[in-house]
Image (cartoon, grey):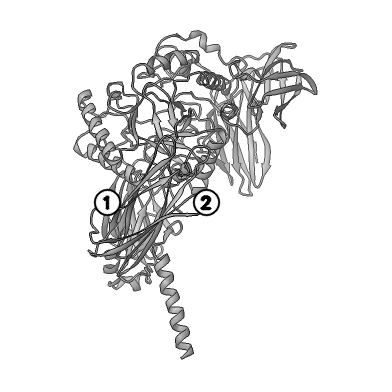
Amino acid sequence: MKKIAKYLLVLSFLLSYNIVFAQKSIRLNAGWEFLKQDLGGIWEAVRPVGLGNPESVPLWENVNLPHCVNATDAVDPDVNYYQGPAWYRTKLKIENPYQNGRTILHFEGAGQKTEVYVYTTKVATHLGGYDEWTVDITDAVAAFQKEEVYQKQFKGQVPVSIRTDNSRDLEMIPSDLSDFNVYGGIYRYLNLVYVPPLSVDKMFAKAEVDALGKLSKLNVSGRFYNPTGLKDATIHLKLIDPKGKVVAQQEKKLSNLNGDTELWSLQINKPQLWSTDKPLQYRLQYDLVSSTGSYKSEDKIGFRNINFVEKGPFNLNGNRLLLRGTHRHEDHAGVAAAMSEEMIRTEMQMMKDMGVNFIRLGHYQQSRIVLNLCDSLGILVWEEIPWCRGGLGGETYKQQARNMLTNMIEQHYNHPSIIIWGLGNENDWPGDFAEFDKEKIRTFMKELNGRSHKLDSSRYTAIRRCDFCADIVDVYSPSIWAGWYRGAYTDYKKVSEDEFSKVKRFLHVEWGGDSHAMRHSENPDKALSKIKTGDSADERAGDASLFGGAARISKDGDWSESYITNLIDWHLKEQENMPWLSGSAYWPFKDFSTPVRPDNPVPYMNQKGVVERDFTKKEAYYVFQSYWTDKPMVHIYGHSWPVRWGDEGEEKMVKVYANCTDAELFLNGKSFGVKKRNSQDFPAAGLRWNLPFLKGKNTVTVIAKKGKVIVTDEIRFNYQTEKWTKPTKMTLTKINEEADVATLEVKLFDEAGIQCLDAINWINFGLTGDGKLIDDLGTSSGSRKVQAYNGRAIIKVKLNKGKSVASVKSDSIPTVFITL
């Protein structure tokens, strides 16, 4: 009897364990095979294959998810990136702990058209690369398990095959004219989820609070997944405050489990508010109990009051907040869109550390991981659908836009960080259709605007750069690129004031310019003398081109980090004295790949980021920090500038970016005085010194103070006084080797052997032998074809513990080699 009692106790524990944890989500990361082409049919993915037989072709490769079809070819300088079908396959051990439970595949995002098969049965299709979606494979799995091959061929596992397709399609959004890659693959996490026969599909929690933060309301409604048609259930709800205290509880009997159901409405006095400085969140826990089991989960919510003042600034919780923003594309060196959770966390923390309190997610719905981090870090969000460029297509096109707007709002409804739903970007850009009808675009924009407000009346709508639709949405952002595509950066304030006067609510998203990492200039503003100023700074057709048209910095400037830090510095110091400004967002945080910029210094890269595609910080990062952060920091410009140049005895400017009150600068151990920071003293907020460098080696040190805190920084460099002529020869040198990886550097010299420090020649690296170039990363030191920066360029080689010969070519200069 004791044994029976013990057995029943263990069985009871296991059953209760399953009830609590059955609705678990398992990331399906490992055990996948990938094929970068189409199949003749689904049978080719599952047929029995003998080793070496003809059926083993085409050959599959082993991969882990997330995985992007275009992980490397998006920045391959020699090819257009692949746009077409690809396949993934795996075998799953299905162990659903619920009797009559549902087995679901949950896609967090896959691009761009997707088909899902269980064995040879197609169980789902999905259109769109950025919203989440689910596939219930329960019935297909049950049917397959009755077949002989389930045990005989697949040994009790279930074959799942997935076809993704990012082929060009004019009747899809986003347009292939967009300035970013339309990626393919299962590039976000794919989860295997077990749920009981009745579960929660979506929970909508509308949290409202007045501007004074005294009285708040919470309205909760739910949508259930009930494929077997259960009639009755009970839901238990619990609200827990940021300190872990239970604020309120509710139990509700449910007799209608179809459609959206009102579940709870309550008021809370003096709620703890969510803000960018203190992003406090409540937890809404719920337990849905039916005759078939229990479904437990929780959502996080936040109480905050938002207000874009008409003809004025932005207020959060009743106080003005200058939105200090940037942008994010889902893109990273070596993986493209398939960023891991760790990568995403690193990126978002870097933004917060730079002082960001606002982000526009360009130009599509992004991962739930991103939104969760915005909630927890205190970063306000503009999230938008990918109706981007090209014009307006037919009914299929429009229905996809409707669906993606609905999905984005419903899937991210509970995030307190979101303040704006974006309806489009650059919808004034034609090209995909013979017809470009502004009135039809306006009509559809009005439809989306109405849909957004109906789905979510608590948030604003916005678009960027479509002046003929500016009156439709709540918040409008015109195109202002002062100092890059048009005009000089000193035009910024006047142009912004002009645009502000035209609309009800103004928010400036997208400004900045490209910088080729590690390229620096002694005279970065030289090209401004060619530029027409005082006119509109609106980007126009062809301005992004590096060829033809009017003079502009984007074409005629030097693309140096030196210029971009000046441009950013000017914008930030002006924004401190624009009390009517709601805010702005620099474009973008990180360099990203794009098919429409093959001629950039790193081919196929938009290089406007303040960090490179692999998170390497450019100098611009520290300019933002000096204006936007409170934690004491100091940074001398030029950490990646190994050789400066000029005449002997000439005084050269050294700029220091800091948020400290004062700083003292030392050259080769000698003090050149203390200066106080003044944000309106351009450049570098007055923290600049003109110094007489010594020919050869120099060391510059800064000691800065903020209150009782002291911070320091130091750089070392050579000062070259010799003048150079045209580059005629190169050297290729191994400058480092670590962990079987060698770093190679090419330098360009004139006939007299003097390094050409302003040379921007195209450099082409090559390698033969056992090693492998670490290239196709889309970075200044990770591309086999790249423009030189200050007469040099770097690349790394994985040696594979063998022998290789590296080469470097440049037009009209003899090729050089090095044995590794």
Q: Position of residue 73 (x, y in %)?
A: 44, 40
Residue situated in front as seen by the camera: 748 or 741: 741
Quarter of the image with the C terminus in it: top right
Q: Position of residue 326 (x, y in %)?
A: 47, 31
> Is residue 595 visible in the rendered structure shown here?
no
Report the side of 585 relative to 791 (left or right).
left
Asked if residue 705 is positioned above or below residue 563 in the image, the reply reads below
Rounded to the nearest angstrom, the CA distance separating label 2 from label 1 is: 43 Å
Characterize the local packing of mark 2: few (<14), some (14-19) or many (20 or more) Cα atoms within 10 angstroms: few
Mark 2 vs 1, N-terminal side: 1
627 shown above or below 672: below
Query: Most extreme residue toward the bottom, as rendered?
Result: 1
Relative placement, left or right, of 644 versus 57 is right
Which of the 4 quarters of the picture holds residue 31?
A: bottom left
Q: Which residue bears the numbered disc 1?
A: 125
| Crowd band around label 1 with a 10 angstrom C-alpha radius: few (<14), some (14–19), many (20+) | some
The amino acid sitting under disc 1 is Thr
- Find disc 2 in the rendering and name its residue: 243
Nearest the eye: 513 or 200:
200
Q: Secondary structure at mark 1?
A: strand
| Tag 2: amino acid | Lys
What is the number of the mark on residue 735?
none
In this rendering, the count of numbered labels is 2
Q: Eyeballing the image, is 190 above or below 335?
A: below
Q: Please provide percent x and percent y for residue 423.
A: 31, 33
In the image, 375 versus 40, the foreground residue is 375
Farthest-out residue, right: 669
x 36%, y 18%: residue: 540
Expressed as whole percent of the image width and height from the top left, the position of residue 248 reads 41, 54
User: Dot 2 lies on which element?
Assistant: loop
Name the residue at 35% across, 63% down: 195
